[in-house]
Image: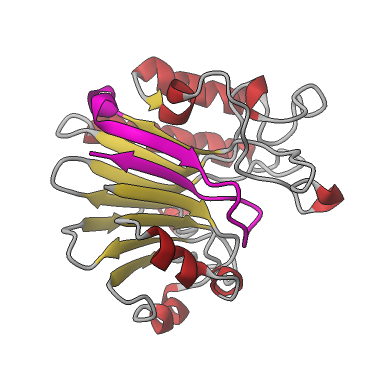
Amino acid sequence: MKIITWNINGWRAVWHKGLLDFIINKQPDLLGLQETKINDHLASNWSDKIPGYKIFWHGAERPGYSGTAVIAQEDLAVNLTNGLNDKQFDLEGRCQISELADFYWLNIYFPNANRQLSRLPYKQAFNQAVRSLVTKLEQSKPVIISGDFNVAHQPIDLANPKANEGSAGYTLIERQFIDQLLADGWIDIWRQLYPNKQQYTWWTYRFGARARNIGWRIDYFLISPSLLAKIKDVQILDQVTGSDHCPVELIIT
């Protein structure tokens, strides 16, 4: 099974930049998108545009903001639930929970703390809500958590760690959330397989950062330990353009 996560930074924009071709070429079983920036009413106009796939939308109430979507092969049995059952988070369309035969898979767009860190308390609350949820879900079957976490965990995960110390996405408290998850037993599978590799999933649009590869790794797959033996590979698809993020692909047997 192939699962891909990708912050597309706008459904309409990435559609016109080749999203359909990407899906046809990669043939994912599941594709989790973040920051779709399209509400559910408008999104329904797109639901029949990808042959062989069904689309589950979770749009934000605020127009042109946040939102997630799951694109699944039509013949794949998926029981999908939107949200964390908490209005303060669910009105931003940030979390989708898919139950499959052998595991749960979460497609999540974690909040950005903002440059002035004004949304850091909101992000902390969201993080702990997710942590509580996945702990509960794992009691019944293994879990895969994927999406844009909006945080670089370690110095190896961004090009300029010293210059960005204390900045949004690299504050100590945000990084400690990843520490908490790892201490709980979750595995950052890309870092597990590639402990010394420096590769990024996001680049600012400014300063020619992507061309110079001055980026951050902020898009992750975290897995239950019981799934480790089933992971064939995980790859950062940094040659794929269309967004300021690139896709990350997980292959699981």
Quarter residue 37 falls in? bottom right
Quarter residue 75 falls in? bottom left
- Camera-nearest residue between 193 and 35: 193
Residue 44 higher or lower than 169, as above or below = below
Q: Is residue 58 visible?
A: no
Q: Residue 210, percent across and down?
A: 74, 47
Q: Residue 39, percent across and down?
A: 48, 73
- Camera-nearest residue between 196 and 133: 196
Q: Is residue 105 visible?
A: yes
Considering the image in quadrants, where does the C terminus appear?
top left
Q: Which residue is at the far right?
A: 207
Q: Is residue 151 left or right of residue 117?
A: left
Q: Residue drawn at (35%, 60%), measured in percent from left and top?
A: 27
Q: Residue drawn at (49%, 64%), measured in percent from left and top?
A: 60
Is 234 included in the stretch rendered in magenta? yes
Is 127 included in the stretch rendered in magenta? no
Q: Residue 67, percent across and down?
A: 49, 61
Residue 159 higher or lower than 247, as above or below = above
Q: Which residue is at the far top?
A: 183
Residue 75 higher or lower than 50, as above or below = above
Q: Which residue is at the far front?
A: 25
- Camera-nearest residue between 145 and 213: 213
Q: Residue 179, percent across and down?
A: 49, 19
Q: Residue drawn at (22%, 68%), measured in percent from left and top?
A: 74
Q: Residue drawn at (77%, 40%), measured in percent from left and top?
A: 116
Q: Is residue 101 left or right of residue 52?
A: left
Q: Which residues are magenta?
A: 224-253
- Camera-nearest residue between 63 and 107: 107
